[in-house]
Image (spheres, rainbow, N blue to C red):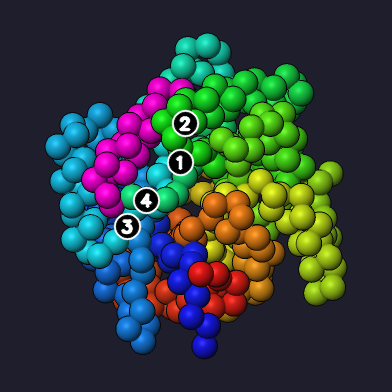
Amino acid sequence: MSQHTLPKLHNAMWPGLVGKGDGPDQEPAISLEQMLDWTAAANVNGRKFDGIDYFLFHPHTDPNASDDELFRIADLIASKGFSVGSLVAPVWPGTVGDSAMGDDAAQQKFLDAVKVACRIAGIFNRHGVRKYGVIRIDSAEFGVSKWRENAKANTSRIADTFKKAAKIAADHGERLAAEGEICWAGMHSWRDMLNLLEEVGMPESLGFQADLAHTYLYLLGYNAPEHALVKEGYSEADFWAAYEQMTDKLRPWTIDFHVAQNDGHVHGAGSHDKTGKHCPADDPNGKLDIVKCAGYWLKDGAKRGIQHICWDGCMFPNATLAKPETWNTILSTMIKVQNAHGWN
């Protein structure tokens, strides 16, 4: 049995929020306290989660919370035995931010959201509950139709916003990770994601967040058929050849990593556009050998500053989140990833 201590094993708090709400057909949001309790209860042969990744918006966090309130949240998280790792900046329209592809007013809102995240990161760092992790962003432009109207100019606009955001993060001692996901304009295929990262060209301050569920749809070319690397009915050999091709391009940029499962379908809930469907770790319809796939992304992870990995079960039904076995199965899978690909 491997005795690797890194990367640390984190659970995400946003499955309690993303796609939840009080609209028609929506399930209510789950409180931070409940998400922490479920995470803390997970136990596999005495092993527990090491920490959490955290979403910086209501109802879990007021982005304008006072220092005292943020210290109280940090105390609560620490009281469960957890560290905080990566933080999700509230970059979307309707939160603090707005589209990274938008006009000057929208761009300023996006940058304000990054400043909010850097402020909260600094408070958690001072508290001591956070010693590693990045700040996650995306283009905050839902869907690709508007982007396609002038792809080159729109990618350049997103890159300009990201460069300014990366400078803000660097000034605060933070790094940004752009999450590759088929619903974000300019980031909706592996090739477009790579183009954007290269146009920003600030690898020390802005890198890539790889999620196993989302990057699987990159292979299929779901929102960019011209960039598909496998065709329907692909063989196992086809899959691994394509997977290696994709990860060889994006891995050098990867500074944050989400363990996840996907059944090849897309899913949307509430205001969240259709994107990679996260499935339970042991979903019989899951298309991914999670442990093997993770190795492609985590190779040389220590050299890129990765100190933790996070499970992402975004948009799971509340009933699934409430089951202890959901979290024990996830934790067991995370331990297998750490054993196979970890380091000390």
Magenta part, dominant SS: helix
Q: Is residue 337 visible?
A: yes
Which stretch did the figure color magenta? 110-129
Identify which residue is drawn at 16% across, 39% down: 69
Secondary structure beneath dot 1 equals strand
Front-lying residue, 342 or 292? 342
Secondary structure beneath dot 2 equals helix
Q: Are marks 2 and 1 in contact (CB under 8 Å)?
A: yes
Which tag, 2 or 1, sits closer to the chain's start? Answer: 1
Q: Amino acid at mark 4?
A: Lys
Identify which residue is drawn at 45% across, 27% down: 171
Question: Picture quarter containing residue 88?
Answer: top left
Q: Amino acid at mark 2?
A: Ala
Locate residue 318, reporting x and y percent.
34, 62
Q: Residue 126 in magenta?
A: yes
The reply, left or right, for residue 109 in relation to residue 210 is: left
